[in-house]
Amino acid sequence: MWKINKNLEIKVAVAEIENLSIPDNEIAFNGLKKSAEKYHREYSNTSIGSVPGVLEVRQFFRKIGIDPTKHRPSSEALLNRAIKQKGFNHINPVVDVCNWCSLEFLLPMCAYDSDKINGDVIVRIGNEEDSYLGHNKRVVNLNKRYLLSDEISAFGSPITDSIRTAVDKNSKNISIVIFAPADYQNEFLEDRLNSFIQRITVICGGVCLKREILHS
């Protein structure tokens, strides 16, 4: 079961996909690179804040006191790399699809190995005890930040995720997540989620057994 704490200015779209077989190819990675090239062509001579969608995501960070220019949403971090032609790392097709969709739709998106998640998941604001080892091999402090937590500890956020629940080439069952502002239209969010699901299942197979949009 997934839920959001009360009075959070955020929506979360969640889907569960089972029985994947993650291939060794760069189909999604090539899609990510093409999307990055398009952003570079169109926005390399403008400020990143002028890109449609960026300010909306920054706003729901500011509502809990986070300066999004210092702690960027993961989607904006990808956009910054795209515009500045910093390149991306190919991890595996699930992560590549996640980054591709996040960049294309400019919403923080995540993918987790469902078998590494323990019990119910809650979206909440972190406290001083919340931290984890992130993908950058650094300890991520989640105090006063949005996070996902299972019955063990925090494992994800719209900034960066933990190694503990990471998807790898052996993952068979995954949970995918999209973070969005509370006033983001459900119709558009469902469309983003459907695209996310479709790209993963076309490349990796699997069946989506559950999808939902959560809000406070």
Image (tube, grey):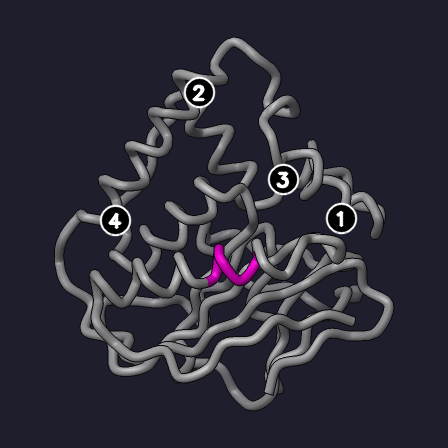
- Is residue 178 magenta-colored? no
Residue type indicated by callout 1: Phe
Image quadrant containing the N terminus: bottom right
Q: Is disc 1 placed on a helix, strand or loop? A: helix
Q: CA distance from mark 1 to mark 3?
A: 12 Å
Q: CA distance from mark 3 to mark 4?
A: 23 Å
Q: Which residues are magenta?
A: 189-193
Q: Is residue 104 above or below residue 63?
A: above
Q: CA distance from mark 4 to mark 1?
A: 28 Å
- Classed neighbour count for the residue bearing mark 4: other residues with Cα under 10 Å, few (<14), some (14–19), many (≥20): many
**Disc 1 marks which residue?**
60
Q: Residue furthest front?
A: 187
**Disc 4 marks which residue?**
28
**Disc 2 marks which residue?**
84
Residue type indicated by callout 3: Arg
Q: CA distance from mark 3 to mark 2?
A: 15 Å
Position in image of residue 6 (x %, y %) = 84, 74
